[in-house]
Amino acid sequence: MFRAALTTSIMALAALWAGCVFAASEQGADVADDDGGARGDGDCFEDTDCVLAGPSCCDCPTYAVDDRSGWADACEQVSCPMQDDCPALEARCDLGTCVAVCAPMTCDLSCSAGFVVDAAGCTVCACSKGGAAAVCQVDTDCVRTPADCCGCDRGGSDTAVPAGMLDGFVDDLGCTGNESCPGVSTCTPGEEARCVGGQCVLAGDPSVPPPGEECGRPELPPCPSGQACVINTKDAEAGTGRCAAP
């Protein structure tokens, strides 16, 4: 029994160092939850049923998987270099599917060109430079592309980049076509490549007024008492914030 356990451990470590990932679509039979219930493959009941994952243990996470996938345990002993430029994502359970979403946070900045939007499409609490640093002027200057090797069609994420930089952006991803992805769509309906504050972002139809009180720019009124400007809320477009309870 000891020899079998040792062999199993060695095989698991070998898979780790090979950059193997554990996708929700690759799990086995139903597993009982702590409360005695059972979840089907890829299912989740609440946010704590999901964990962030990426192309390998040391890459920035770009999607989320079922906590039974073995991802967290497999990567626990892997030593990775410090990374301070990963998008601020969090794992959530959305209608029974694990997804990675931008983490909401309060931001007390007022930015004339809107907030910065990172490569994952998350709004960052920093002012977009716009003006001379602008990479686009109109929406047609921007194109939609997968932000990682899965893309939102297969459980990853999409982004928007200047049309002239598309080829270089795709090459820099270094995708091989053999990446393990969750295999479920995480695309947001209605999102399109747009030019916002001189930057290419994925955003909704500009002709549809966004819900809630927009905030974060000098010409907008301050948030009501008891509320703060929160970025990355479910109804906030990229580059803007919404007044909400912090």
Image (cartoon, helix red, strand yellow):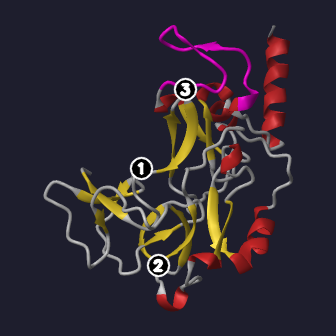
Disc 3: which residue = 44
Sequence-wise, the earlier of marks 2 and 3 is: 3
Q: Which mark is residue 197?
A: 2
Visible in this render: residue 168? yes
Whole-percent x, y for residue 30 in the image: 66, 14
Q: Are marks 1 and 3 in contact (CB under 8 Å)?
A: no
> Relative to 4, is 88 on the left or the right?
left
Visible in this render: residue 57? no
- Magenta part of the chain: 25-45
Question: What residue is shown at x 47% (from left), y 28% (from top)?
Answer: 46
Image quadrant where residue 81 sits: bottom right
Q: Which mark is residue 234?
A: 1
Q: Secondary structure at mark 2?
A: loop
Q: Which mark is residue 159?
A: none
Q: Is residue 169 magenta?
A: no
Question: What residue is shown at x 60% (from left), y 45% (from top)?
Answer: 186
Sequence-wise, the earlier of marks 1 and 3 is: 3
Q: Chief secondary structure of the magenta span?
A: loop
Q: Could you tell me the amino acid type at mark 2?
A: Gly
Above or below, 186 against 9 in this view is: below
| Separation of residues labelled 1 and 2 (CA atoms) | 20 Å
Whole-percent x, y for residue 113 in the image: 41, 80
Give whichever of 108, 224 is nearer the camera. Answer: 224
Q: Could you tell me the amino acid type at mark 3?
A: Cys
Sequence-wise, the earlier of marks 1 and 2 is: 2
Q: Could you tell me the amino acid type at mark 1?
A: Lys
Q: For mark 2, does the 10 Å Cα neighbourhood hold few (<14), some (14 to 19), or many (20 or more) residues?
A: many
- The residue at the far front in this view is 207
